Image: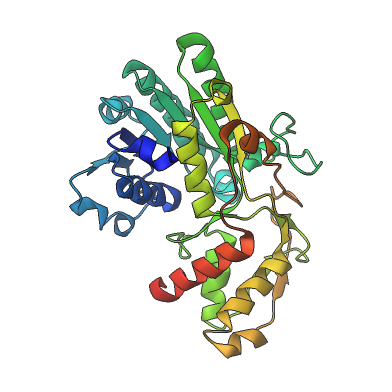
């Protein structure tokens, strides 16, 4: 049986469902004939991301905030599974405003765990983060070894993992955490003050502006195309391997790409659309506070316990996302 066949007619709550990752999950689940509820307060998500889904009878929207326990209880009622994506992302945002990041990412997370426990949700899958690896420098990153967190955001995401583990021990709530590594893809907002690097660079190049790299371009990341992340979430709610539950996994591609290599990929595929983009030079700025130099995930644990297989390489993903941005920017 294919993983998406297992979710047919299942009731699934996606928190942060109007955000970049959440909206892509909602779209996939609806196409797989699941019954989907989206909970979002539109602090960072966008209505346009779910506009087409609102016409589907299997999709419903609850506009609300995970910081309100009553809202979480209402959203979790009758659900089979929860895909918890709601959070305030961004390392710089958390450094600028650690209190709000803590309220949303820790208090909100705890509310969702309590509501999932109270409403007898079968499995709680949540967005963890590669930022949890902190100052641990060895590569590739394996799930069992982490360092000290380098930002308030990283602290919040590590606390999520501790709470999830605790709720299994004390309340027998099954959870799976997915440590996302630099996810990119369709619907990622290039206009946010804390926009991720790929949509930001695409927008700059299309406007014939020089992308600004923090540092000398040698910093590297494990950029992960959105469809790989969707697959990980689906595997997490459908796996029948008991040893795979109550674990944390790297959700990644398993490829290391420097920022300079990334810009060259973007220029390569954008030049087909606009030859002048080939001439645009990169600018270099200061290193960003809280940034780690290099990131690369081991995906062996997910391969072993969830039968995960990467669907798209970094270059495959960039080619697909550029097609999307050309139609939507």
Q: Residue at x 62, y 78 (%)?
A: 267
Q: Is residue 288 left or right of residue 201?
A: right
Q: Which residue lies most toward the right here? A: 138
Instruction: Answer left or right for 102 relative to 250.
Output: left
The quarter of the rendered structure image containing the N terminus is top left
Quarter residue 11 falls in:
top left
Q: Could you tell me if residue 1 is visible in this image?
A: yes
Q: Nearer the viewer, residue 56 or 107?
A: 56
Q: As displayed, is residue 312 above or below residue 15? A: below
For the point 72% across and 68% down, which residue is it? 261
Give the position of the C terminus as an image quadrant: bottom left
Q: Nearer the viewer, residue 210 or 245?
A: 245
Residue at the far front in the pictured view: 1
Instruction: List x then y, in percent, for residue 269.
Output: 58, 77
Location of residue 238 in the rendering, given as x and y in whole percent from the top left corner: 44, 32
Residue ID at (55%, 69%): 319
Q: Is residue 251 above or below residue 244?
A: below
Q: Nearer the viewer, residue 24 or 46?
A: 24
Seen as rendered, the residue at the extreme top is 170
Residue 103 in the image: above or below residue 222: above
Residue 85 shows in this picture: no
Residue 22: where, in percent of width, then height?
40, 47
């Amino acid at each position: 049986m294919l993983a998406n066949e297992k979710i047919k007619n299942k009731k699934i709550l996606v928190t942060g469902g109007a955000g970049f990752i959440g909206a892509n999950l909602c779209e996939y689940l609806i196409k797989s004939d699941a019954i989907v509820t989206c909970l979002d307060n539109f602090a960072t998500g966008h209505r346009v991301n779910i506009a087409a889904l609102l016409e589907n009878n299997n999709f419903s929207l609850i506009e609300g905030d995970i910081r309100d326990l009553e809202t979480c209880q209402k959203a979790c009622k009758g659900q089979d599974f929860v895909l918890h994506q709601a959070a305030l992302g961004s390392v710089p945002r958390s450094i600028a405003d650690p209190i709000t990041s803590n309220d949303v990412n820790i208090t909100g997370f705890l509310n969702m765990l309590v509501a999932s426990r109270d409403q007898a949700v079968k499995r709680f899958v949540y967005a963890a983060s590669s930022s949890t690896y902190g100052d641990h420098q060895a590569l590739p990153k394996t799930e069992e070894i982490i360092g000290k967190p380098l930002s308030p955001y990283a602290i919040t995401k590590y606390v999520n993992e501790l709470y999830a583990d605790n709720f299994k021990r004390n309340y027998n709530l099954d959870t799976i955490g997915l440590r996302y590594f630099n996810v990119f893809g369709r619907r990622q907002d290039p206009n946010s003050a804390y926009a991720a690097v790929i949509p930001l660079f695409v927008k700059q190049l299309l406007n014939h502006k020089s992308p600004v790299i923090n540092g000398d371009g040698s910093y590297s990341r494990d950029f992960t195309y959105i469809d790989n992340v969707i697959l990980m979430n689906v595997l997490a709610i459908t796996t029948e391997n008991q040893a795979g539950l109550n674990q944390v996994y790297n959700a990644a591609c398993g490829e290391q790409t420097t920022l300079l290599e990334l810009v060259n990929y973007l220029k390569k595929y954008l030049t087909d659309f606009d030859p002048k983009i080939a001439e645009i030079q990169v600018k270099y700025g200061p290193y960003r506070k809280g940034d780690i130099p290099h990131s690369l995930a081991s995906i062996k644990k997910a391969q072993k316990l969830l039968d995960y297989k990467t669907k798209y390489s970094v270059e495959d993903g960039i080619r697909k996302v550029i097609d999307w941005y050309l139609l939507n920017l």
